[in-house]
Image (spheres, coloured by chain):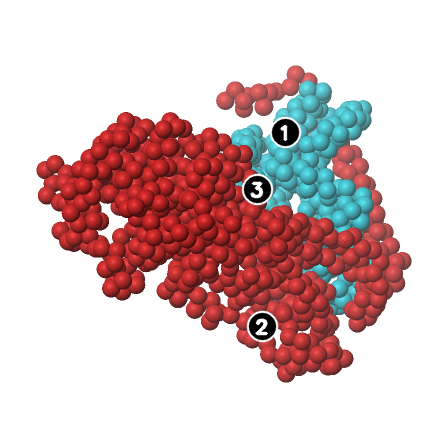
């Protein structure tokens, strides 16, 4: 047996998929390399991020072992717990200006992160218990659940996460076969709700959107970031300026070159080819997940995987659009590349769930 | 489990598994198509930025670049009530470094160090600021350059890459120590300040108000920054200004203080440590506010040398201590007029009633004797004489009759034990003891002897010089005035109510202190051109043995200075329609009559001119 073979078999023994793990590993390594450059070659950033990724991988491994029937059984309770914690965070949460965290003394926990997984889970469980495509009542109930979950996150206020959770949830409903005329109806409803949402946005969020529409509005703040990010991206050219030698001096003009704007560093130092390479890796990860979904023979697994993959995809698209000036700065990190712990752990946990649902091997069995 | 059952509710419809999976399949295809479209869009976007427009962005990045410079607003001036400048901005020069234009840090620092001395302190501060600043933002290396340093740097300018001499405005306090504690000073902004104040508002600013008026009115004085869009050449030097949005300068702040009064008060203190407060009786406007010794606030503006700062901290006379705002002094006999009003109001004394002072007072069943300051006592004493000669026994007896809680209640009306509400930060509360307070603080019952000495303003009771002046203003204005203020007035209100004869009796006693034949401060009657009223006080610093005779004021001169009593004086003028109230505290001055009253009279003489 070849070494590859043994590796693949070993991974499948712990209910993981070799191709997906390979792609994720490649992405994380590239991420650490870019982070080293973006963080002014500060090794401690790389070490910290590696530790977080390690925690995420451990969470992935644990979640992959949970059998599907338990997920089906637990889904409503897990969702209820996440919802309750979101409500608690409204009351007692700690956070700089925004209520996002629950402080348990030892660890601080962001309930909105748990929502990224539990919402697709509960919707998939709920809808797959019923005939598909869903009829009107289940559809409405699902949409209301999505609205409540992302609404609670929106008022924290955390626009970026609200978008991710909302699209992940809606994706499940869409994949379940929601009829086109209902989609049209929902679309009309959302358009009608937009003015109300605008009124409920916090000032800083309104500013971000207004600044996006007219960067000159705030030349020292958000608009500055967009302008400078575009200059960094554009000056990268075909093949970039080379690792560690971004001419924009490692993007010191950006307040967070190693978090939300890490893609600008990549674009400047590795050029269009580097951008394409990373986008292709993201695409391959998504394609592999869709393949895994395809191989599942039950609607539940397919819907869960679909929902998680969509929110992963939205992460990428929103962040990359943001640094290239296509979308306003909404504060969404680049998955598995941006510096920061919570989202990396949740994302890897989500991939653990996907692989566990797909695996036909019994837990610890042969 | 109802939830679980509802959740899993089986459907009546017969389910076709294969058909359902087909539905999902088709949706996955839709999803894949949308995702592909998005990714293609992104690929196109990056192709546009990086390939089509590459030249444009590369040239913006490499050659000519548009830089944004935040423009600092000019800090508002601080003026006295006649418009004389108390804090101003002076033109000066500083050495700044633009990080991105420095090819070699060590070489640059060595070159500059050969031309002007850069202290370790300045170097450390520069390195901290450099880490915070954007690469094109100038970071100050040395401020307040001397003119010879400016000349030397200008001569070598062509050799110093990334180094510039830049004109700027620096805060200056022309009267130095005279207003140090009132105005406070501005100091360099550090990271914590930026976080607290908002980095956008302070992006271009280097200084922020640290204490005093500069701190309390930071928002008004600072202003709003502007922004300038400039085009720079390859070396980063500004080629031209493209656009300019001017900063909104800070507002000038006119204070109620009077430079002449302030000067008179500081001169009258004549080297003593202490405080003088002069208030406008009707409104609470502060006309003079001195804490001595002071310090030169100018040395804090550009960063005080650690050794100089240590010297200020180590100075036993504590020049940094704000005595008028935070000093806690036993009021001594200056509390007697306020207690007299309490006694009259509560019916414990009558202004005509006389009692006999034989020189000491003794509580029932307690052996200890509480003494008069005059050996052998004052004989028959009414209220006027009790105030004029400051007869302790009269007030011992009244205090016992009132009890501590009633005394506390009445004194609180005059503002004792609480901040006056002046528009400065960090005001002290003083202390007005009660039974409940002592139980909470020490877990002990209140002793009757403590009531006795509270009657002459000793024991636990302490007040700030500002509180004493405010209480005196309240008394002079018969209960109606505003909180002391330097810029923002509060509407005067009736804070204390007493019967007219009571006000008159107490005021008459205070006039006798100055103008009566046996008044404790009769020696200063001639110092002021008009008749005025007052009360002296002496607070013990050095505890005497119980049975010792009270130390005569004259004997105080023989004690080492730090054991001498604090001397106090409160007063107001004119006596008919009072306009000014004053308080004087002289630390270790010896006696209120011999030291504090003459100082008060000197200031009063200048004020009523």
Residue at the image point whose x is 78% and y is 57% from the top? B228
Q: Chain of mark 1?
A: A
- What residue would you read off at disc 1? A148
Left or right: where B135 falls relative to B577: right
Q: Which mark is residue A297?
A: none
Marker count (numbered): 3
Q: Secondary structure at mark 1?
A: helix
Specify the colour of chain B: red
- Counting other residues with Cα less than 10 Å from the Cα at mark 2, is it few (<14), some (14-19), or many (20 or more)? some
- What residue would you read off at disc 2? B123
**Mark 2 vs mark 3: which is more N-terminal?**
2
Whether residue B355 is visible: yes
Q: Position of residue B505 (x, y in %)?
A: 34, 33
Can you tell which of label 1 and label 3 is closer to the viewer? 3
Q: Position of residue A326 (x, y in %)?
A: 80, 47
Q: Chain of mark 3?
A: B
Relative to residue A147, is residue B524 depicted above or below?
A: below
User: Label 1 vs label 3: CA separation?
Assistant: 49 Å
Q: Which mark is residue B488?
A: 3
* Colour-to-chain, cyan: A
Please state which of residues A172 and B145 is positioned toward the viewer in this rendering.
B145
Please state which of residues A313 and A47 is positioned toward the viewer in this rendering.
A47
């Amino acid at each position: 047996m070849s070494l590859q073979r043994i590796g693949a078999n070993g991974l499948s023994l712990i209910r993981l998929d070799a191709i997906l793990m390979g792609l994720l590993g490649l992405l994380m390594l590239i991420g650490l390399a870019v982070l080293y450059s973006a963080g002014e070659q500060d090794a401690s950033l790389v070490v910290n991020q590696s530790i977080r990724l390690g925690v995420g991988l451990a969470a992935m491994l644990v979640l992959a072992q949970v059998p599907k029937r338990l997920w089906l059984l637990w889904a409503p309770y897990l969702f209820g717990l996440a919802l309750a914690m979101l409500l608690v965070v409204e009351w007692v949460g700690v956070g700089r200006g925004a209520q996002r965290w629950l402080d348990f003394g030892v660890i601080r926990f962001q309930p909105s992160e748990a929502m990224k997984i539990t919402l697709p889970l509960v919707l998939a469980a709920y809808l797959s218990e019923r005939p598909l495509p869903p009829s009107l009542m289940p559809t409405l109930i699902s949409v209301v659940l999505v609205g409540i979950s992302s609404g609670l996150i929106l008022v924290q206020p955390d626009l970026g996460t609200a978008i991710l959770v909302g699209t992940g949830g809606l994706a499940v409903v869409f994949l379940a076969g929601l009829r086109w005329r209902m989609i049209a109806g929902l679309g009309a409803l959302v358009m009608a709700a937009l003015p109300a949402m605008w009124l409920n946005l916090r000032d800083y969020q309104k500013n971000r959107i207004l600044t996006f529409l007219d960067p000159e509005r705030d030349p020292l703040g958000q608009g500055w970031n967009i302008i400078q990010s575009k200059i960094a991206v554009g000056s990268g050219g075909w093949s970039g300026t080379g690792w560690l030698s971004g001419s924009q001096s490692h993007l010191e003009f950006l307040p967070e070159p190693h978090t939300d704007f890490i893609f600008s560093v990549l674009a400047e130092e590795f050029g269009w080819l580097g951008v394409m390479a990373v986008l292709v890796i993201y695409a391959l990860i998504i394609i592999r997940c869709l393949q895994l979904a395809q191989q599942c023979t039950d609607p539940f697994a397919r819907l869960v995987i679909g929902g998680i993959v969509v929110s992963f995809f939205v992460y990428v698209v929103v962040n990359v659009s943001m640094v290239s000036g296509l979308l306003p700065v909404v504060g969404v990190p680049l998955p598995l590349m941006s510096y920061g712990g919570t989202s990396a752990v949740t994302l890897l946990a989500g991939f653990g769930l996907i692989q566990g649902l797909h695996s036909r091997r019994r837990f610890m069995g042969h | 489990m109802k939830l679980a059952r509802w959740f899993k509710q089986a459907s009546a419809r017969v389910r076709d598994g294969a058909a359902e999976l087909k539905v999902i399949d088709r949706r996955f295809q839709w999803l894949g198509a949308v995702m592909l479209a998005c990714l293609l869009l992104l690929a196109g976007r990056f192709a546009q930025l990086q390939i089509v427009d590459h030249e444009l962005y590369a040239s913006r990045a490499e050659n000519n670049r548009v830089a944004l410079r935040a423009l600092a607003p000019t800090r508002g001036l601080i003026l006295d009530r006649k418009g004389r400048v108390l804090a101003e901005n002076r033109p000066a020069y500083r050495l700044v470094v633009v990080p991105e234009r420095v090819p070699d840090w060590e070489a640059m620092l060595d070159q500059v160090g050969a031309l002007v001395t850069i202290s370790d302190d300045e170097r450390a501060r520069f390195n901290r600021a450099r880490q915070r600043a954007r690469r094109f933002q100038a970071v100050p290396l040395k401020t307040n350059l001397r003119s010879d340093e400016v000349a030397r740097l200008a001569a070598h300018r062509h050799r110093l890459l990334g180094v510039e001499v830049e004109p700027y405005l620096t805060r200056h306090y022309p009267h130095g120590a005279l207003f140090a504690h009132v105005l406070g000073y501005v100091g360099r902004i550090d990271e914590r300040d930026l976080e607290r104040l908002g980095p956008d508002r302070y992006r271009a600013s280097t200084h922020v108000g640290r204490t005093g008026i500069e701190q309390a009115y930071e928002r008004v004085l600072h202003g709003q920054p502007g922004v300038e869009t400039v085009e720079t050449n390859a070396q980063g030097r500004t080629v031209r200004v493209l656009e300019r949005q001017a900063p909104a300068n800070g507002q000038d702040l006119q204070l109620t203080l009077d430079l002449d009064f302030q000067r008179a008060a500081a001169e009258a203190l004549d080297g003593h440590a202490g405080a003088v407060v002069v208030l406008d009786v009707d409104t609470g406007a502060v006309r003079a506010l001195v804490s001595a010794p002071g310090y030169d606030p100018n040395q804090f503006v550009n960063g005080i040398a650690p050794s100089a700062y240590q010297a200020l901290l180590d100075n036993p006379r504590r020049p940094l201590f704000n005595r008028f705002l935070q000093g806690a002094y036993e009021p001594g006999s200056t509390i007697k007029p306020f207690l007299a009003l309490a006694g009259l109001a509560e019916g414990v004394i009558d202004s005509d009633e006389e009692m006999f002072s034989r020189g000491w007072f003794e509580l029932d069943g307690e052996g200890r004797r509480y003494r008069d300051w005059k050996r052998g006592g004052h004989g028959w004493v009414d209220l006027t004489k009790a105030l004029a000669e400051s007869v302790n026994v009269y007030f011992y007896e009244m205090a016992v009759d009132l009890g501590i809680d009633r005394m506390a209640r009445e004194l609180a009306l005059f503002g004792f034990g609480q901040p006056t509400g002046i528009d400065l930060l960090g005001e002290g509360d003083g202390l007005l003891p009660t039974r409940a307070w002592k139980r909470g603080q020490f877990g002990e019952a209140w002793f009757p002897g403590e009531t006795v000495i509270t009657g002459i303003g000793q024991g636990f009771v302490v007040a700030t010089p500002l509180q004493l002046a405010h209480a005196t203003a309240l008394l002079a204005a018969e209960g109606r005035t505003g909180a002391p203020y330097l810029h923002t007035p509060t509407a005067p209100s009736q804070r204390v109510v007493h019967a007219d004869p009571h006000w008159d009796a107490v005021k008459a006693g205070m006039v006798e202190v100055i103008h009566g034949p046996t008044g404790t401060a009769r020696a200063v009657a001639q110092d002021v051109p008009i008749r005025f009223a007052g009360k002296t006080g002496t607070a013990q610093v050095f505890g005497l043995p119980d049975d010792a005779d009270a130390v005569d004021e004259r004997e105080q001169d023989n004690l080492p200075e730090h054991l001498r009593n604090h001397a106090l004086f409160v007063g107001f003028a004119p006596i008919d329609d009072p306009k000014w109230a004053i308080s004087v505290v002289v630390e270790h001055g010896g006696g209120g009559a011999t030291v504090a009253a003459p100082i008060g009279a000197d200031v009063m003489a200048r004020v009523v001119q």
